[in-house]
Image (cartoon, helix red, strand yellow):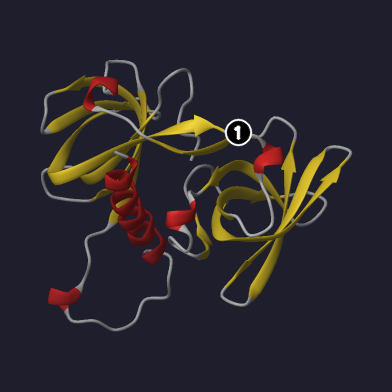
Amino acid sequence: MIKNILPAVLLGLTAIASTALPAAPVHAEDQKPEQIHVRGSIVNYSGSALKVKTREGETVDVTLADGWKLASVANAAVTDIKPGDFVGIASLPSAGGGDGALEVLIFPPAMKGAGEGSYGWDLKPNSSMTNATVADAVKGVDGRTVTVSYHGKEKKIAIPAGTPVVTIAPATNDDLVPGAVVFIPAEKAASGPLAHQVLVGKNGVVPPM
């Protein structure tokens, strides 16, 4: 199951990352669909569609593309973050300088390099997402600070105590029950969001990204 999940999630994260890269002149036929993120709770699942009540309170119908893939997230710990790990960290600028993490996703080894870079993110206003390799992880009084590297650059991010830390885990369609929390990287289409992959929360763990 996990072998089927990883390529799909990799594709989705890479597509998300590409939206933050500087735009180069392209022909109209070469333009990729606009990427959007749907965060919310499942209202119902019908096999080819998900009805989701978003965190903004709107109810949207998400069309599931042919061959769509499903994954979940499992709890991890900040102490699991080790040099050489590839992580995705959503963060906000800190008042004292640097960035403070909002959540951390520890990628499985097979997904190392997915969406590498640092770019704007919509978890909260002014937040960013950094997909990068951990250079070092130092324990401090109030949590942990990691130095991550991407494309020859480095960034230090503080991870306060209590920050959600997760990793990718398997899921089945039986997990798509009303009330389950989802994170869906989707394409903006005329008929509504079109999804090739879905991350669903289960066992009390929700996708924090």
Residue 163 in which image quadrant: top right
Q: Which residue matches tag 1?
A: 164
Q: Please state, as top left, top right, bottom left or bottom right, where the N terminus lies in the image.
A: top left
Res. 122 in view: yes
User: What's the residue at 73%, 54% (across, down)?
Assistant: 146
The number of discs equals 1
Residue 179 in which image quadrant: top left
Residue 147 in the figure: left or right of residue 46: right
Residue 152 rendering spot, x and y as whole percentages: 62, 77
Instruction: Name above or below for residue 9 compared with residue 19.
Output: above
User: What's the residue at 65%, 34% (across, down)?
Assistant: 77
Res. 194 in view: no
Of residues 106 and 110, the one nearer the viewer is 110
Which SS class for mark 1? Answer: loop
Instruction: Name above or below for residue 131 compared with residue 57.
Output: below
Instruction: Name above or below for residue 141 compared with residue 94.
Output: above
User: What's the residue at 24%, 20% (across, down)?
Assistant: 174
Residue 88 rendering spot, x and y as whole percentages: 54, 52
Residue 162 in the figure: left or right of residue 71: right
Of residues 126 and 182, the one nearer the viewer is 182
Q: Residue furthest right?
A: 141
Residue 136 rendering spot, x and y as whole percentages: 75, 58
Q: Residue furthest top?
A: 178
User: What's the residue at 56%, 58% (across, down)?
Assistant: 130
Residue 64 rendering spot, x and y as whole percentages: 16, 40
Name the amino acid, label 1. Pro
Residue 54 in the figure: left or right of residue 73: left
Mark 1 burial class by Cα count in 10 Å: few <14, some 14-19, many 20+: many
